[in-house]
Amino acid sequence: DSDSDSDSEDGELERKRTKSNSNKKKSKKTPKPLVAYSRFAHEKDINSIDVAPNDKVFLTASQDHSIKLWDFVDGTHIHTYKGHKRTVWCALFSPTDQIIASCGGDGLVKIWSVKTTQCLKTLEGHSTSILKLAFVANGSQIVSAGSDGVVKVWKVKTSECLTTIDGHDSKIWALCARPHGNTVITGAADGSIVQWKDNTEEVKDNERKEEEEKLKLQQELDNLLQAQEYTKALTLAIKTNRPRTILRLIRTLNEQQKLNEIVPSLEELNMDQVAVLLKFVENWNMNSRTSYEAHLLLNLIIHTTSLQHWRALPNINVILNTISAYSDRHIRRVDLLLQKAHFIDYTFQQMRDGVSIAAKK
């Protein structure tokens, strides 16, 4: 019995120790972070804080219209940047240069020198408050987001607005981007998020390819004209939509009295290509300098296109009415010139006759 009592007492003591240890663990406090310093930084609300890439200083932007630069270690105030006329919503360090970008309720993006506090540039383009900024493309561009849902991309070096995007239907309160990347994510008051990708390089590459293709085609057209292969030149110019080349071809053939050489090519054109040529005629006929060539080409088209095909052409009535209206104007101008020429000729003849009579007397 004494052994059993001893065992029960030992078990009771063990349970108490376990319970006591458990209570100690529960009562253990989580360490709180120490306050390194506290400062009265601005007179009104602080809207954003950004730490410099070197972790030595940081920025604060406030509703008191100012931006302030602080020492990261001890919180010493270093500089104040003033220039915004309304609330400063965001201020950021450039990831690569010694500049700061800020935006505010005045609808302006400002670029500041970190060291001198001088405002280097002011980017104007937004019609409402700018709420967020971000540097992209290795700091060479800035993305700004407005309270009207509009996103703009700026080139820092030239202050040029590269593009404007109507991205949201309400205020854009959030904007995040990788400084060295080409992707931006925006979030708006309507609960929507949109991811944007910078395709500047792709666009430039496509433009460069298009320009190379244009130069190649132009060289081919010049070679055909040089070789006097007018039929092939006309066909290629129509396919590549080259009205200037066709105008030059019409002038050359008319001077050489060889317009009939392109008749076979015109007879082989489909209705879409005929419609393109008629559009050229319409545009040329609006200018007195090219109206003559317009009528030459129109005459060729009339004689190489059947009545049935004319009726099938889209908007043919509108095109012909426009051509007719300008042609009437050119005819009136020519008639007026002829009248003046006749009057001058008559005056000159009368003066000459008068001189002859006087000489006889």
Image: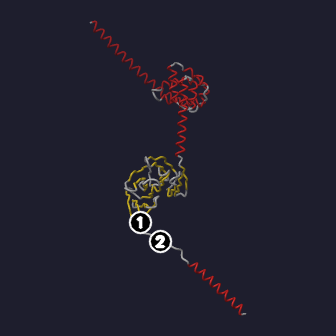
State the residue at coordinates (36%, 18%): 344
State the residue at coordinates (66%, 87%): 12
Q: Is residue 200 above or below residue 42?
A: above
Identify the secondary structure beneath mark 2. loop
Q: Is residue 302 above or below residue 197?
A: above
Residue extending farthest to the top is 360
Describe residue 340's horizontal placement relative to residue 226 as left or right: left
Identify the secondary structure beneath mark 1. loop
Please tell me the numbered disc located at residue 305.
none
Name the quadrant containing residue 333. top left
Q: Which of 199 and 274 is in front in this view?
A: 199
Q: Nearer the viewer, residue 109 or 155?
A: 155
Choose the circle earlier in sequence order: 1 or 2: 2
On the image, the x and y values in percent for residue 87 come to: 41, 59
On the image, the x and y values in percent for residue 7 come to: 69, 88
Q: Which residue does the numbered mark 2 point to in the structure image?
A: 34
Residue extending farthest to the left is 361
Residue extending farthest to the bottom is 2
What is the distance, in whole Å, between disc 1 and disc 2 at their CAs?
Answer: 15 Å
Q: How crowded is mark 2: few (under 14 residues within 10 Å), some or many (20 or more)?
A: few
Q: Which residue does the numbered mark 1 point to in the structure image?
A: 75
Q: Which of 161 and 360 is in front in this view?
A: 161
On the image, the x and y values in percent for residue 260 come to: 56, 20
